[in-house]
Image (tube, rainbow, N blue to C red):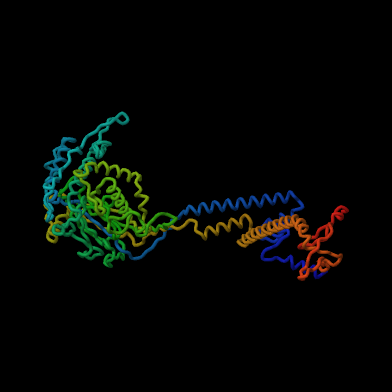
Amino acid sequence: MEQELARGEEERQEGLIEFYDSFKEMFEFFCKNTTIHGTIRLVCSDSNRMKTAFWTLLLLASFGMLYWQFALMFSQYLAYPVVLTMSMHSEPKMFPAITICNLDPYRFELVSEHLVQLDRMAEESITFLYGINTSARLFHMNDRNIHVQGLANLSRSGFKLSQNFSLLRMSDLRSGKKHSSVGFRLCNSTGGNCFYKTYSSGMDAILEWYRFHYMNIMSQLPVIINISQHEEHIEDMVYSCQYDGEPCRPSDYVHFHHPVFGSCYTFNSKGTDPFWTATKPGIPYGLSLILRAEQKDHIPLLSTVAGVKVMIHNHNQTPFLEHEGFDIRPGIATTIGIQQDEVNRLGGNYGKCTTNGDDVDVKLLYNNSYTLQACLHSCFQHIMVQECGCGYYYYPLPAGAEYCDYNKQPAWGHCFYQLYNRLRNHHLNCFDQCPKPCRESLYKVSAGTAKWPSAKSQDWVRQALRHQNGYNSTSNRKDIAKVTIFYQQLNYQAVNESPLLSENLLLSSMGSQWSLWFGSSVLSVVEMFELLVDTLVLSLLFCYQRLRAKKTLRVSATIPSVSLALENYRVVQEEPGKGEEGARPSGMRDSTGELQLQPLPQRCPEVLLDGFGCTKEEDLGQE
């Protein structure tokens, strides 16, 4: 008896997969042995159905709240939110690139005649609109043309200024008051779908109208023009240049010409020279420039500003002076303090950004590093070449394209202004195709101004500049300016994006919720997984047993007919207590020695076929 009990205890020991007799037994075993709080109350309170129902509802509610919290966590995690972390760093760093322009674009001899015609058209338009004669004061004051060898004058090429874009004054009624605006009309290639490019300010309308004609004239120039023989020397614009108390070197700047802002110089464009390393903050350790701020009035209607354009930007970056930068006034000393901020974006699922622009679909038309403005300009130029058939003059051209000219493309202005409005209203896909850089340096600027030179010092300052730099101004107008650019402090602020909900934090939050609602750990999850595996295995076993039982019943229902059909060929006699061993075949052997089975009298024999016997009819009747 004791051996049987011990054997029973061994059979009841927990195995890898439990083979329970019923689901109830399995569930009771789980509730009594799990580490999940509250489940044992389902078993201990089975005699009290009210308590059992209460604890069942309580556990189900806890499960519901738990998985509701899990759903909220996963929805927040899949939204990939970010949090900004700010940190301060202090270390020597490279001085930024500085670009200055004299706001005095060239008059190329190739297009000089048509620029003169454009000036006359502008005179007539201003006289028509405002009744002011500006010919003696505004135009033809000090024309100096730049000659490009090997190119004939444009007048021989057949280019003609169009008279179809005259400035008009328009009036309309708004809120019962009469308002006037100035603009010019633009139509498509068939002469329809016209609209007026209007401005509330006549000055803005005249400047835009002049720039529109100017682009058509300048489009006649070759894409690449060698102006090295006529290039202004930096001494003609920069009278003095010092950085960190040391004079600047010729290798510290590069020169280029901008069609609107004139002759430009960029200092420290590459950012690789140790000479430009900033080791101390303050005005004495910055870049100090004395600049000529005189406007020669080469093309006065391209800009109404007199002075110098200055822009602070990153190294190997194209300066977009029409969008950024600030103006330096003549006769003023300007001190500009800069503070650097560094922004690091995550990218990937957390936001769209690019490391170097290689993964951007837009092909950049600029040879410098990737910037958002460079990508937007390139995207707009590609779309304009595709839809308008020509390129915008102020942006680089794609391969095989040409700049717009209303002698060849009469409706390009209509196409351009509509495309530009779509870009400005974010209706073009350029903002979707052009992500921000993943790493970007930004410069915050604070400026202060003072009159310079003072009334008592201007005489000797001018004399010193005249003897040293050939300064020969005889005008009373202030035509020089001083600008100092420096680091306010070498500390820079780094703004980094980091995931608001990382994988580790997600698991930690899920564990906290699990502990809150069930007071258990990750091992309890393993127990639940084990319960699911046991339930699955037990279900499969029960299904297998049921299928086997059905098959057995099906076979037992067909075997008696088979046994009776074979009774003439295999007869088995069963004697009480002998079973199969007492079975003797009945028959005779023929002359060949083979056994010949003899049929028996018509009665229900005791037949055994595969363990199934035939029962006599009279026995069935007695039963």
Please identify the residue farthest to the top as the structure is shown. Answer: 176
23 w.r.t. 161: above or below = below
Residue 575 seen anywhere in this rendered image of the structure:
yes
Left or right of 485? Residue 81 is right
Foreground pick, 454 / 579 = 579
Residue 414 position within the rendered picture, expressed as x and y whole percent measured from the top left? 26, 41
Say which of 531 and 330 sits in front: 531
Tell me, yes or no, if residue 453 can be seen here: no
Quadrant of the image occupied by residue 237: bottom left
Q: Is residue 581 left or right of residue 21?
A: right
From the top left corner, tell me how far across and down residue 52 is, in percent: 72, 51
State the quadrant of the N terminus: bottom right
- Where residue 318 appears, as percent x and y from the top left, is 27, 56
Q: How many marks?
A: 0
Q: Is residue 297 above or below residue 91?
A: above
Asked whether, in this view, residue 356 is left or right of residue 511, the answer is left
Is 505 positioned to the left or the right of 562 in the image?
left
Tell which of 396 and 442 is nearer to you. Answer: 396
* Horizontal and vertical percent position of residue 135: 12, 41
For the view shown, which residue lies furthest in the right direction?
622
Which quadrant of the figure has residue 175? top left
